[in-house]
Image (cartoon, grey):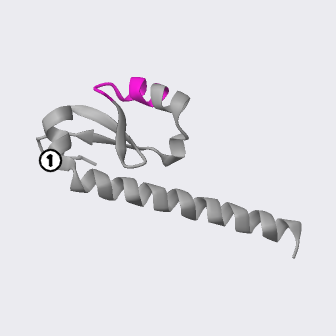
Amino acid sequence: MSILFDKVSHMRSEYLLIFDVQARNWEWFRRNYARLVKKFDGEYVAVFDRKVVDHDKDLSSLAGRVREKFPFERVLVEYVSREKVVLVL
């Protein structure tokens, strides 16, 4: 096998791992949303390894702290709100 093939295979494996980690974090977030709303209504939460590791009303502040402490591609950041969020495109 070539070095290029090995590198591509490794990259593919890493992307699949990140996708799996994000899927598990998203599933945890979805299942625990009602509890999260009670505690973090109106805030962004950062979920790493199926745990809230930080939260803030300001997304930029939260992202800055999370990037310093965790591999950012493995952290799910979502907004938590009792109110339905409507996106206007």
- The residue at 83%/66% (across/down) is 4
Q: Residue at x 30, y 34 (%)?
A: 44
Stretch in magenta:
55-64
Quick check: 28 left or right of 33?
A: right
Q: Secondary structure at mark 1?
A: helix
Q: Is residue 3 above or below residue 39?
A: below
Q: Position of residue 2 (x, y in %)?
A: 88, 72
Q: Residues within 10 Å of mark 1 (few under 14, many from 20)?
A: some
Task: Spot the residue most to the bottom.
Answer: 1
Q: Is residue 30 left or right of residue 71?
A: left
Of 43 and 28, nearer the camera is 28
**In x, y percent, where is residue 17?**
55, 61
Magenta segment, principal secondary structure?
Answer: helix
Please state the horizontal and vertical placement of residue 85, each as a whole percent of the image: 18, 44
55 sits to left or right of 17: left
- Image spot of residue 39 (x, y percent): 17, 34
Residue at image location 14% in from the left, 47% down from the top: 34
Find residue 6 and report its image quarter: bottom right
- Give the amino acid type for the residue marked by disc 1 in the picture: Ala
Q: How many marks?
A: 1
70 up-or-down from 60: above or below: below
**Residue 6 magenta-highlighted:** no
The residue shown at (34%, 55%) is: 26
For this orientation, the residue located farthest to the right is 2
Q: Is residue 41 visible?
A: no
Q: Examine the rendering and report whether any part of residue 13 can be seen.
A: yes
Q: Magenta stretch containing residue 63, yes or no?
A: yes
* Residue bearing mark 1: 34
Name the quadrant of the N terminus.
bottom right
Above or below 59: residue 5: below
Quadrant location of residue 16? bottom right
